[in-house]
Amino acid sequence: MTALAKTPLATIVHPTDVAAVSTLAFAHALDLALTTKSRLCLLHVRGESDAPPGKSEFPHVRDVLAGWNRLDKGAPPAAIERELGLRVSSVSVPARNARTGILDFLEDHPCDLVVLATHAQKGLTHWFDASVEQKVLRKARIISLFLRDGAKGFVNARTGALALNKVLIPIDDHPNSLPALGRIEAIVKLIFPTANIQLLHVGDCAPNLIDEQGKSPDLPVMIRKGATVETILRVAEDLGVDLIAMPTAGRHSLLDAVRGSTTARVLDDARWPLLTVPVG
């Protein structure tokens, strides 16, 4: 794939429910922030009439880092940044429901990556009565990582070990997905430089993806026939991937975009982490 400058994930946002922390999603957000030297923003949405919480010293962050042997037990809050270079902030916003609070925050505070937990039941997180994941897919230029509770991720929540060995990227024949492919590759290599990336096209022949400079991805493209979503999931199972990454039509309504709809259906059914990167 054409060489791109690696752009750090400067800010990672992780919406978290204090009463029901998603261990897997939190572990990924924390480890990715450590690995990429990013700022980690922990977002909590409270009721409109609830008082804001007192100043947080990130006890859960320190506990997890100590359990990963990255920080001494009982270390002061300042040690998180002083010893690990990790900047953590905690934001509490009032809203009528968690879904609205998260989407409004992301609208007003652009970030480089949002890490979201999803529930085993289709389309639901453990905070919501409606699908925040699919609504996030509607928003342009938000790179999102979805982790399903109870599924296997590429970060070990107990030890903090990160292993991103195989990444599957389903592609179609739309040339404007090339920049998104480049961003996916840059992110993957930033997280785990030795990761193997496999492109997949469901159809009769490989799409002819050529950028404005006449260059095309230099990664092999696997061709498979069949129903799109089912084929993507079957190939992911056969290859034993650690992550599915998909360009998404972020400038259009999710329900009006074929790729966006495919991404949402993969999100519903996949047992692997899903990274979505808007095209354009």
Image: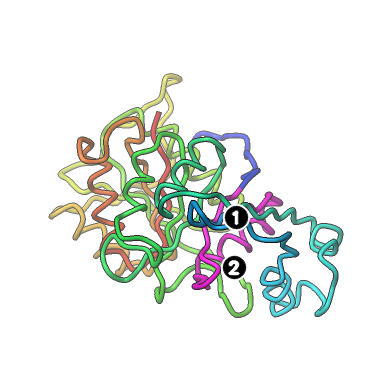
Q: Which residue range is magenta in the image?
A: 12-41
**Callout 1 crowding tier (Cα within 10 Å): few <14, some 14–19, many ≥20:** many
Decide whether residue 28 is among the magenta residues.
yes
Q: CA distance from mark 1 to mark 2?
A: 9 Å
Q: Nearer the viewer, residue 51 or 157?
A: 51
Label 2 crowd (10 A; few <14 / some 14-19 / many >=20) = some
Residue type at tag 2: Leu
* Residue 25 is covered by the magenta coloring: yes
Query: Which quadrant of the figure contains the C terminus?
Result: top left
Q: Nearer the viewer, residue 258 or 96?
A: 96
Q: Are marks 1 and 2 in contact (CB under 8 Å)?
A: yes
Residue visible at 27% across and 56% down? 266
What's the amino acid at mark 1? Ile
Residue 89 in the figure: left or right of residue 72: left
The part of the image, by quadrant, that contains residue 258 is top left
Query: Up-down: is 194 above or below 178?
Result: below
Q: Which residue is mark 1?
A: 191
Q: Is 180 located above or below residue 22 in the figure?
A: above
Of the image marks 1 and 2, the number of the one nearer the N terminus: 2
Can you identify the residue that label 2 sits on? 162
